[in-house]
Image (tube, rainbow, N blue to C red):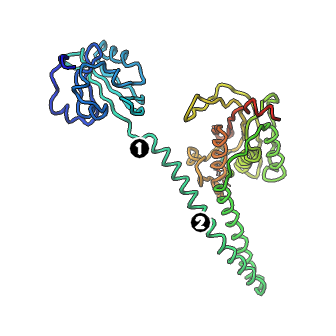
Amino acid sequence: MSNYRPPYPVPGVIWASLPVPSLLIDRKGRIAEVNPAAETFLNASTRSLVGQPAFDRISIDAPMEEALARARTNQSPLFINDVDVTAGDRPPVQCNIQVAPMHDNPDIILMLISPRDIADRLGRSMSVKSAARSAIGMAEMLAHEIKNPLAGISGAAQLISMNAGPEDRELTDLIVEETRRIVKLLEQVEQFGNLRPPDRRCVNIHDALDRARKSAVVGFAAHMTIVEDYDPSLPSTYADPDQLMQVFLNLIKNAAEACGRSGGTIRLRTFYDLALRLRRKQGSPAAVPLQVEIIDDGPGLPPGIAADVFEPFVSGRENGTGLGLALVSKIISDHEGWVTVDSVPGRTVFRVSLPIAPKTNKEKL
Ligand SMILES: Nc1ncnc2c1ncn2[C@@H]1O[C@H](COP(=O)(O)OP(=O)(O)OP(=O)(O)O)[C@@H](O)[C@H]1O
Ligand SMILES: [Mg+2]
C-alpha cells in the first residue's frame, strides 16, 4: 500500500532487534508497522503488510477487535494466552498475545505475538509418553533376555537340592521361589508389551463387571465386601470383553490390595452421564456417557505417587510392578474412553467412562 502513510514514527533499533513478532496497529485496525520477526512470522515484507487490515493477514482465534478497543479505552495492556494464530496458509500456531496502547498515542496499539514454545507445551506430555514407551520397550527386551538364564539358575538350584542337606535345601528352595517370582514379574512386563488391538463388539458392562467380580471374590478379594450398585438400564458399550474385564479386575485388585488384610468394602457403581465428552484429535468431541466407578474405603493413593499412578512402573506397593493402572489406561484409551481417579483417605474412586455401542453394531446382536 504505497499511499499508506504510517501514523507513527518508525520505531528504532530496539524495534528491529525484538525477537518477538511485533506489530503496530492503527485506529482503523490496519497494520502501521511490523518488525523483522513479524515479517518472518507472517512470511511477508513490511511493504506488503503496512496499510492492510491486520486481521485479514493474521487470523487470531479470539475477539481481537474487542481486545484492542478495550486496551484503547482503558489505556492499559491486555494479555491473551493460548490462542491459535494463523498467518497465510500455515497451520495454526499456539501463541500468547500481548497488546498495549502506545504511551504517546493511545490510538496506536502495539501487539506482540509470542508463539508458545512447543517443547514447553506439547513436548512435556509427548516426552512422558515416549519415555514410557521406550521404558516398556527396554523392559520387554530385558524380560525376554532374562527369562532364559533364570530358567538355568532355577534348574541348577533344583539339581543341587537333590543332594543337599536340609539347611542348604532351604537356600535352594529360596532360589527357586525367588526365581519364580521374577519370571512372573517378567511375564507381566511382556504381557503389557504384547497387548493386542481390541476386538470390539457390543458388550454389556455389567457382564464384564460380573466376570471380574466373580474371579476376584474367589481370589485376591476374598476378604472384601463387594457391593453392586448398578443402573440396569445402562446401554451396551463397544469393547473387547476380555480387555474390559481385565480393566475391572485390575481396579478391583488394587482396591483390595490397598485395603490390606483387614478388608473393606468395594462398591461397583454404574450410571449414565451424558455431560462428559472427550476431546478427540479430529472431529467433534465424542460422548462417553457410560460410567463405571470402582470405589473403595481404603487408605487412598499414597500422596507421593498420586499424580503418576497411570504411568508404567509407578507403584506404592512392595513387590508391585506398577503396570496395572498403565494397562488400564492403555486399554481404555484404545477404547476411546477415559479413566480418572479421585482419592482421599477412606474413599478412592476410579472412574471409567466409555462410549455407547454404535447403533448398527447393536442390531447385529
Ligand atoms: N484403590 C487404590 N487405593 C490406594 N492406592 C491405590 C489404589 N489403586 C492403586 N493404588 C496405588 O497405585 C499404585 C499403582 O497401581 P498399579 O496397579 O499400576 O501397580 P501395582 O498395583 O503397584 O502393581 P501391579 O498392578 O502391576 O501388580 C499402587 O501400587 C498403589 O500404591
Ligand atoms: Mg495393581
Tell me if mark 1 has few (under 14), some (14-19) or many (20+) residues whose alpha carbon lies within 10 angstroms of its own.
few
Which residue is drawn at the image coordinates 82% and 45% (left, top)? Answer: 211
Q: Amino acid at mark 1?
A: Ala
Which numbered marker is on residue 142? 2
Residue behind mark 1: 119
- Dividing the image into 4 quarters, which one contains the N terminus? top left
Q: Amino acid at mark 2?
A: Leu
* Disc 2 Cβ-to-ligand 1 distance below 8 Å: no
Asked where in the image residue 62 lies, by quadrant, the reply is top left
Asked if 352 appears above or below 60 in the picture, the reply is below
Asked if 223 appears above or below 228 in the picture, the reply is below
**x%, y% of residue 239?**
73, 40
- Dividing the image into 4 quarters, which one contains the C terminus? top right
Which residue is drawn at the image coordinates 67% and 48% (left, top)? Answer: 197
Asked if 231 appears above or below 133 in the picture, the reply is above
Instruction: Give the distance between the C-alpha atoms of the residues marked 1 and 2, in whole angstroms.
Output: 30 Å
Closer to the camera in the image, 266 or 7: 7
